[in-house]
Amino acid sequence: MKLIFERSQPGRRGGEPPRYDNLPRVDVPDELSRAEPPRLPELSEPEILRHFTALSNRNFGIDTGFYPLGSCTMKYNPRINERLVGLPGFAHLHPHQEEDGAQGALELMWRLQEILAEVTGLHAVSLQPAAGSQGEITGLMLMHAYFADRGEDEQRRKIVIPDTAHGTNPASVTMAGYEVTPVKTDPRGNIDVDDLRRKVDGHTAGLMLTNPSTLGLFDENIEEIERIFHGSGALMYYDGANLNAVCGISRPGDMGFDIVHINLHKTFSQPHGGGGPGGGPIAVRDMLEQFLPVPGMVRDGDAFRLDHDRPKSIGKVRGFTGPFGVFVRSYAYIRSYGPRLREMSEVAVLNANYLLARLKDTYDLPFDRLCMHEFVLSARWLKREHGVTASDVAKRLMDYGFHPPTVYFPLIVPEALMIEPTETEPKENLDAFADAMIAIAREAAEEPEIVKAAPTSRPIRRADEVKAAKQPVVRYLFDEHPSRVQEPAGVTPES
Amino acid sequence: MSFLSLTDADREAMLAEIGVDSVDELFRDIPAGMRFDRALDLEPPLTELELQRHLEALAARNVDTTKELSFLGAGIYDHYVPAIADAVLQRGEFLTAYTPYQPEMSQGILQAIFEYQTVICELTGMDVSNASGYDGTTVAADACLIAKHATGRSKIVVTEATNPQVRQVVKTYARGFGLDVVEVPHRAGATDADELASASQDAAAVIFQQPNFFGVLEPAPDLAAAANDAGALAIAHVDPMSLGVLEAPGAYGCAIAIGEGQGTGNYPAYGGPHYGFLAARNEFIRRMPGRIIGETTDLDGDRAYVLTLQTREQHIRREKATSNITTNQTLLALQGLVTLSWLGPQGIRDVGETCMSLAAYAQERLGLELVFADRPTFKEFAVRVGRSARDVIRDSRERGVHPGYALRRDYEGLDDALLVCVTEKRTPADVERLAEVLHEVAG
């Protein structure tokens, strides 16, 4: 398919912004004036819309079909929330508006804070972080601030992270100026508590843990883990990527965690838009509240205001008070469920266990337990017996009309297939997916070349990722572009 | 209201297949002491209609730019968002997709972001852009980390005329990065290149904003030269809507260009979500944070797009990654791409010229003393209102006009300074109305 630049014609126009030719024209001083105009696309509005419609037809979202991408919680995104976020009182509200002109927005954020405190079992919330990974680094900054306040920051340099963790955890640790102490997983898929005891000491600032873990397993030793960390004066950080498993069932604060981030684009249904936006609010235990980012959001009687007076705050991690539109959608989502959030998590766990039950005889299950909201299978039998890898299975699923699960993660499971159906899928879809997985395993044995050649029904076949990285072409280069389409621009039928 | 899809019969059949008697049993691995033993203390569920009423009531308590004639800017701008930007955004195939890990499922968004990277490079005069950052503040912190690793130095110089929130975020991140941040004061609203040059010795990076926070046009080529002469990376924080009329940072020697994309395609939305952009010269490509889309071919030799240079990223490199970023602002960047495609080269020039004309007209009609009269401005300018700017804002708002931003929020000694922003959405009649109101309420 053509790039939008290959559809351009010099002089063709889309929009025409207002001009006031009766007003005096103002010239930019020569030394600051643009010499060469930017080569933006030049298309009429209808052709722009057709271009992006054609692109959307080459993309797969939850609206298209089942999307069991493990750890990403691809649940239905209610359309009512899109209507609400577009209300002029939200979409057109300027973030520098005086507080008396933003009471509705401030109240919504205050209410969301209260809800997140209740769901996590913690005391205070900052909505500011823009994503889960920003919540992580914010949490680590809070650890620095907390220990600095106690005169222990120089001494406590290490953050313990299990080998099942998301890559963001160690990356955040480095960015925050800490060092990673890895800890192993035991044969039941829990943190290896003996390994942990050896590694936690007075130099440990904290733990980062996803619970349930990226294996989809609730850590059965969580009480002992809590004793080890708090016993040594360290803090506990909860990666909330998997919060969808436990809303109203078990709260991170009650498990002993001191800092939690919540991925609003996972558990609370902010659409992920092909990579973002997201939201990563953090909830903390009371002794950490004073270090939260500025401004805070507080209620004074019937009025709501921003509180900039936090002398021990770590500062700001993002502009303004965070991604407000994300808050509108997530607040609306939570208000739809109310206390039934528990049922949301129950069904997420039921759906995952059902799918697991249907697949565990066909694929290798590295940890044979009931799962929470997701589970990890391994294609290592298929690889050993038939040379068919997890990636091959994933690609073949596309031909059956499904988005593949997460593959090759967590790293401790070879040929991992990490499957998260979410609560919004009906049983028929789970069955159809299970049937496809079973059929692919049969194909792997009988006609492995079909699986290895997949997909054949998508807009492209397998892409050469090695070539892309070796000779990076990361922007259109116009006349020098290697793959430039030379035909005349204009309408070409798209498949 | 819920969005669950199981019938009671489904549940029974599923529990039987799993081999448990109840849903509660599925949670048996959670230690008893960790189970939440009451219902969540949340208000009862709402139906869709009740939800709409509730949120409409909250929205009605906000005074947005459709209810009040607003001249607020200061980093977030009320530019026009074309209808097709909304239409494209609501395509479910884009809206409800995750990060494009599987290229065969995601050619649409991958190609769109490749196109986005191209328009950002074109606007800024750079070679490589990432797929977006969280906003215009966090991309500045990202750029500092590139500079630290590229130069081996640990000092960041930032001009005081750079957006205060950008400076705050840089300072917050700097501690973990092991960086010291030095601010260079403005002189009558702009940065002195000689002063910047002496501050830039041994610096990893020099960050300045063009136009700066006061709307003033900095001597940007001189500032970039001051950074380059000191061996520091010149980082320009630019307004994309200005780049039809203002020179591209790449053309005057900057290493990195960053900025807030909001004005180009996103609604103000009380601060987000928006997109930040980060573009650089080719030599920094392997130090870039975040997703980058690259072109390649598929098995049949056909053109295809993929996430590339992933060995920089956290899911591969873990603690050695260039950044922890995963989620970015793809959908908002897509809205930016659609808007920039709609504007085209002529439209973005027109917007810039219209903003400048209207702003000049406003300066004349307001007849108030300019705070920084020595240098040209773009779409914002600061005036003295003769008494507390906050009081003037309050009194103007009682007349249905939000006249601008009180600079004393961030700058001492500017108590009576009002930063007025005029975008192409304002009309000459709107400017007349502002002049009328300020004549009534200014001291």
Image (cartoon, coloured by chain):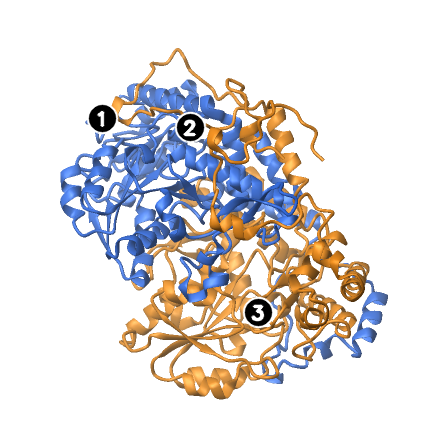
Rendered location of residue A387, percent (x, y): 69, 66
Per the model, the C-alpha gap separating discs 1 and 3 is 63 Å
Determine whether A70 is above or below A230 in the image.
above
In the rendered structure, the colour chosen for chain A is orange
Q: Amino acid at mark 3?
A: Pro
**Residue A429 seen by the camera:** yes
Report the residue marked by disc 1.
B369
What residue lies at 38% left-to-right and 82% top-to-bottom?
A233
Mark toward the start of the polypeptide (3 vs 2) = 2
Is B368 displayed left or right of A88 in the figure?
left
The chain holding disc 2 is: A
What residue lies at 27% left-to-right and 32% top-to-bottom?
B216
Is A274 displayed left or right of A258 in the figure?
right
Mark 2 crowdedness (10 Å alpha carbons): few <14, some 14-19, many ≥20: many
Local secondary structure at mark 3: loop
Q: Amino acid at mark 2?
A: Pro
Indicate the quadrant where residue A351 lies.
Answer: bottom right
Local secondary structure at mark 1: loop
Mark 1 touches mark 2? (CB < 8 Å): no
Mark 3 crowdedness (10 Å alpha carbons): few <14, some 14-19, many ≥20: many
The chain holding disc 3 is: A
Is B354 displayed left or right of B16 in the figure?
left
Foreground residue among B272 and A462: A462
In this rendering, which labeled residue sits more in front, label 1 or label 2?
A: 2
**Could you tell me which quadrant the C terminus of chain B lies in?**
top left
Report the residue marked by disc 3.
A410
In the rendered structure, the colour chosen for chain B is blue
Marker disc for residue A38: 2
Residues indicated by labels 1 and 3 sit on the same polypeptide chain: no
